[in-house]
Amino acid sequence: MPFSGFWPRHCFLCGAARDVRDALCAGCRGDLPAPGPGACPRCGEWRSPPAPCRCCAELGPAFDETVAAYAYRYPVDVLVRRLKYGGALQLAPALAAGLARAVAGREMPDLLVAMPLSSRRLRRRGYNQALEIARRLAVLCQRPLVATLERTRDTTAQAGLTAARRRDNLAGAFRCRRSVAGLRVALVDDVMTSGATLDAAARVLKAAGASRVCAWVAARTAAPEY
Ligand SMILES: [Zn+2]
Ligand SMILES: [Zn+2]
């Protein structure tokens, strides 16, 4: 059970009081698991050596590139879940900092867009964890964060659905509020599992004119299903 983080100057994971930055001590920050030894550059499926996966060689998702800061396993899974469901907003900066390091040296997008929640879910949760990460990341990358995507409805749980059912489930779930014609967009989310939600959102951004969409995620599951 991770330390509750009652004292903000103590490490959220181990409770240590030394070298705490972004709610984690230097030791715990250094121990966060890197994403696998290699990945498909487009969808992020783990492969070693890194090479386009068969799916992307044939068709692939609507986004052009995936960058993940961490592997979605302990303790990153704990951090993501506590940020997402437990109101631990103090964990967003550590995930954003990891993502900023992961994208450093890459071609920077024109703008960042956070994966939106439906207004119903946003009301219930009170915040959007992807936006909390994106807000800090925008500062670190010195790129504007633009609220251009809207989630028009909740989608039922994706787990257990076939790829075709996932696409049906997500059809019409996003809307773009303004043109992003000719712009390179980084779509920021907390975690990528199947990639289907990011694919649906990227598809809408592309339809609104985006020249390039990159999926920037704090964590990637070990066994993507895309
Ligand atoms: Zn620690
Ligand atoms: Zn791929």
Image: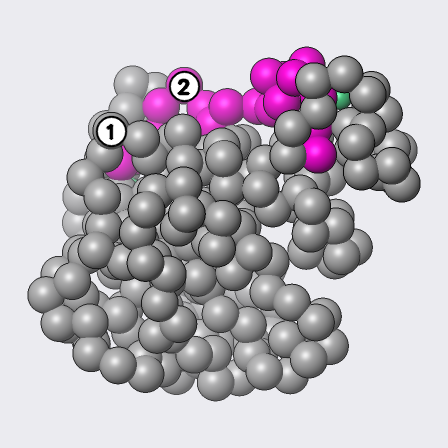
Which residue occupies 67% across, 43% down? 91
- Bounds of the magenta segment: 23-41
The amino acid type, in three-letter code, at marker 2 is: Pro
Where 201 sits versus 178, above or below?
above
Q: In the rendered view, does 142 fall on the left or right side of 6?
A: left
Q: Nearer the viewer, residue 202 or 146?
A: 146
Principal SS element in the magenta part?
Answer: loop
Which residue occupies 44% across, 62% down? 114
Q: Nearer the viewer, residue 142 or 118?
A: 142
Q: Which mark is residue 48?
A: none
Which residue occupies 64% across, 83% down? 120
| Residue beneath disc 2 | 37
Element at badge 1?
loop
Q: In the rendered view, does 41 fall on the left or right side of 158?
A: left
| Residue beneath disc 1 | 105
Where 203 sits versus 55, above or below?
below
Q: Position of residue 74 (x, y in %)?
A: 69, 30
Give the image quarter of residue 63. bottom left
